[in-house]
Amino acid sequence: MAGLVLFFGLFISIQYFFTFRTIDKKLMQKGPESVSSPSGKYTANAYYEPYGGAGPSSGVNVWVEISNNENHTIKTIYYAAAKS
């Protein structure tokens, strides 16, 4: 019984919970421009990664990272698979 509960717990955690650390950035491409905050403290960068081929199975993964220019940290704030 404990094995069954463990199996379903792992399945649910892998299937329904996402961490930004799992993003595969080897094919990533930077968007056309960066956007800075009015104070210049933060900069937002958009990235995308094409996947699939031609046809309905293709698309892109899109994410946005915010850079703190004062303490040089980067945080991913948005990630989505865009299929249309």
Image: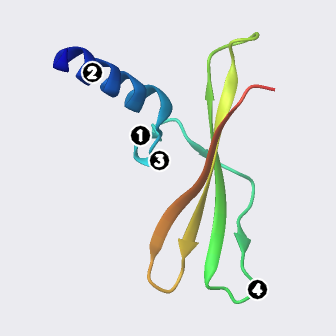
Q: Residues within 10 Å of mark 2 (few under 14, many from 20)?
A: few
CA gap between label 4 and label 2 equals 51 Å
Q: Nearer the viewer, residue 14 or 43?
A: 14
Mark nearer the viewer, 4 or 2: 2
Q: Residues within 10 Å of mark 1 (few under 14, many from 20)?
A: few
What is the secondary structure assignment of the residue under circle 4?
loop
Q: Residue at x 52, y 35 (%)?
A: 27
Pick the quarter of the image with the C terminus: top right
The amino acid type of the residue labelled 3 equals: Phe
> What residue is disc 3 on?
20
The amino acid type of the residue labelled 2 equals: Val
What is the secondary structure assignment of the residue under circle 2?
helix
CA gap between label 1 and label 4 equals 31 Å
Mark positioned earlier in the residue sequence (4 or 2): 2
Mark nearer the viewer, 2 or 3: 2
- Checking the image for residue 22, the label placed there is 1
The amino acid type of the residue labelled 1 equals: Thr
Q: Residue at x 41, y 40 (%)?
A: 22
Q: Residues within 10 Å of mark 4 (few under 14, many from 20)?
A: few
> What residue is disc 4 on?
38
Q: Are marks 1 and 3 in contact (CB under 8 Å)?
A: yes
Mark nearer the viewer, 1 or 2: 2
